[in-house]
Image (spheres, rainbow, N blue to C red):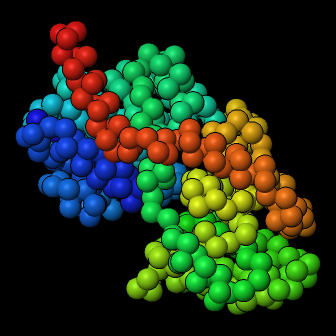
Amino acid sequence: MRVFITAGEPSGDKLGAALMAGLRGLVTDVEFHGIGGERMQAEGLQTLFDMDEISIMGIAEILREYRHLKARIRQTADTVTQMRPDVLITIDLPEFSLRVARLVRAVSDIRIVHYVAPTVWAWRPKRAQKMAAHVDQVLALLPFEPPYMQAAGIACDFVGHPVVTDPQATDAEMLAFRDAHPGPMTLILPGSRRSEVARLLPIFGQVVRRLHKAQPKMNFVIPAAAPVVAQIEAGLADWEVAPVLLDPRDPDAAGRKRAAFRAADVALAASGTVSLELAAAGTPMVIAYDMSWISRQIIGRMLLVDTVTLVNLVSETRAVPEFIGPRCEPGAIADAVLSVLKAPEAQRDAMALTMERLGKGGMPPGERAARAVLDGLSRAAVRH
C-alpha cells in the first residue's frame, strides 16, 4: 500500500505520525511519501520538502508568501498524480491541503482523505459544500462534526481527539511541583502566536494584579510556548506581580509543563485547543480572547455558535466562563477566576464528560483514523 500524506505544522505532524503508526499496525506492506516533520519522518515518511515551508498562518502572511506557496502546492499535486498512491491524506492546513486536493482531483480519481474537519459548525458553513467536490472522506476530531460534513455529501468519521492520549503528570510529579510553589496556583496561558500574546499579555497582567490583591499568597505560573517565550519575557517587565515562567528551552520543559497543568487550581487561558489540554489535566479554567476591531466585526457577524470553548461545545454545557472580544476586560475576568476557584465542581464534571466524548479509554485516535481510512478504501473498491 502506498500512502501520500501531508502536514504543515506540529499538531498535524503529531496526528500524521499516529495515523502512520496505526496503518503500519494494520497493513503488512505500507510505504509513506509526502510532507511532514520529525515525528512523521520517524515513522518512515520520505518528505518532499521541509514542512515549515508551508506552515503559514494569517491572511497577510499568506499573501506575502503566495508565489512560493503556490509553487509548493503545484509541486505536491504533480508529485501525487505522477506517483498515483492508493490514498492522499491531507492533514489540516486547509489553505494548502484543499488546494492540493483540488488539483489532484481535477486530473485523477485518487482517493482523497482530509484529516481534521473544518469548523463549519462555527463559521463559513459553505466550506463543506466546496470540499465535497474534491474530498472523498473527512476524519473528524470532535464527535459533533460528522453530521455537518455528511449533510454536504462527504463521508465523515469521528476518530477521537489526540488529547486523550497525551501523557499526564504523575501524582508524585504534581505534588513535587505544588511543594515547590505552595499556596493557590493559577496558570496563565496567553497563547502561542505573537499576535495573541501582544494583545492578551497586558490584559492578563492586569488580571493577575487583581487576583494578587484578592489572594496575596496566590502563585502565578506561565508555561510559555517556544515561539513566544522571548516576547513573554519582555512583556513581563511591565507586570506588578512576577509569575513563575516555565521556559520551553529548559531540558525538562515538557515534564514541568505537565506537572504545572495538573498542579494548578485554575487557569486563565487564551481561546483554543489548550482548553482540551486543561480538561485532560482536570484543571478548571476561564477563557479569554481579544482581536482587532475589524476582526471583531467580521467574525462577530459570521459566528454561528454562542461559545467558542471546546469544553463547552463537546460537553454541551456552558460550564467554562469565556470573555471574547469586547468582554475581554480584566475586572470581569478576575471575578470569574475567583468564582471558578471557589466552586470548580460543575467544570470538573464537564471536563470529564468532554474527555469521555473525545474517546478517552477507547481505541487510540491514530488507530481509529487508520481503520477509517482503510474502511473508506474498501467501500470505494466495492463501488467500483
Check the image and report above or below for 175 versus 274: below
- Identify the residue shown where x is 51% and y is 16%: 151
Q: Judge left or right: residue 51 versus residue 188.
A: left
Check the image and report above or below for 353 versus 112: below
Residue 187, percent from left and from top? 68, 72
Residue 259, percent from left and from top? 55, 74
Residue 3, percent from left and from top? 17, 39
Check the image and report above or below for 58 versus 209: above
State the quadrant of the N terminus: top left
Check the image and report above or below for 338 versus 146: below
For the image shown, how many numbered marks are present on the structure? 0
Tell me which corner region of the image, top left, top right, bottom left or bottom right, holds residue 19: top left
58, 337: nearer the viewer:
337
Q: Residue furthest front?
A: 172
State the quadrant of the C terminus: top left
161, 331: nearer the viewer:
161
Residue 128, percent from left and from top? 49, 26
- Identify the residue shown where x is 53% and y is 22%: 147
223, 350: nearer the viewer:
350
Tell me which corner region of the image, top left, top right, bottom left or bottom right, holds residue 327: bottom right
- Identify the residue shown where x is 77% and y is 83%: 183
Q: Can you see residue 57?
A: yes
